[in-house]
Image (cartoon, rainbow, N blue to C red):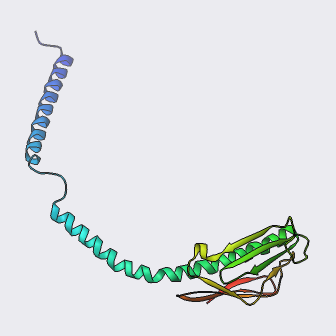
Amino acid sequence: MRPHPVIQTRALNFTRSENLISRIKRENSNQLQLSYGRQNGYTLTEILITLGIIALVGMLSGGWLATQIPRYSLSGAARQVRSDFLAARMQAVSEGNKYRITFLDDRRYTILDDDNNNGRADPGERVESRDIQAEYPAVTLSSTNNPIFHPRGTASNLATVTVTNEAGSRTVKVSITGRVKISS
């Protein structure tokens, strides 16, 4: 008596699967034996060469970076002064009163929220002090005037503020229309 055809086919498939699995195991064991001698990682020579290249690039770029820091500091200080002027102008328009900026010396200035528009700091009026050298050391300021921003966005007591350090100078100009501009 012959086995049923379906049972015979399944037995044949099982035998083929068993042969395939044993072949894969043999091939994988051969590959494992071949790769057993190799180690992962880097040699000491490769690490030392890489560290040498990194040190060389660091030395070359470090000198260049040191010469650029004063220039970036000068630009940042000029942008800070301009930003404070524009903020004072915006507040003058939104609150409907004057904002006065007074330069105290070569590094400090104040921003007065002059609620009653009398030109003096009265009790209850907000006065903010700024020291440019707190964020930008070795930067000095000189101003031709103390600008006042009006509720319509215009300015009086037009001023030119010169921001200076070892890299050079930048000027921050306030026009009668209230425009604040940085120039070299």
Quadrant location of the N terminus in the rendered image: top left
Numbered disc total? 0
Q: Residue at x 16, y 21 (%)?
A: 11
The reply, left or right, for residue 79 in relation to residue 166 is right
- Residues 184 and 24: in front is 184
Which image quarter: residue 165?
A: bottom right
Q: Residue at x 60, y 73 (%)?
A: 134
The reply, left or right, for residue 168 in relation to residue 59 is right
**Above or below, comparing residue 31 to residue 7 in the picture:** below
Quadrant location of the C terminus in the rendered image: bottom right
Q: Residue at x 85, y 67 (%)?
A: 95
Which image quarter: residue 20?
A: top left
Q: Residue at x 13, y 40 (%)?
A: 28
Which image quarter: residue 115?
A: bottom right
The reply, left or right, for residue 76 in relation to residue 50 is right
**Above or below, comparing residue 157 to residue 116 in the picture:** below
Indicate the position of residue 43 as horizontal and vertical percent values: 16, 60
**Residue occupying the far top of the picture:** 1
- Residues 66 and 3: in front is 66
Indicate the position of residue 99 as horizontal and vertical percent values: 82, 75
Indicate the position of residue 77 as horizontal and vertical percent values: 61, 79
**Above or below, comparing residue 36 to residue 63 in the picture:** above
Indicate the position of residue 2 as horizontal and vertical percent values: 11, 12
**Above or below, comparing residue 184 to residue 76 in the picture:** below
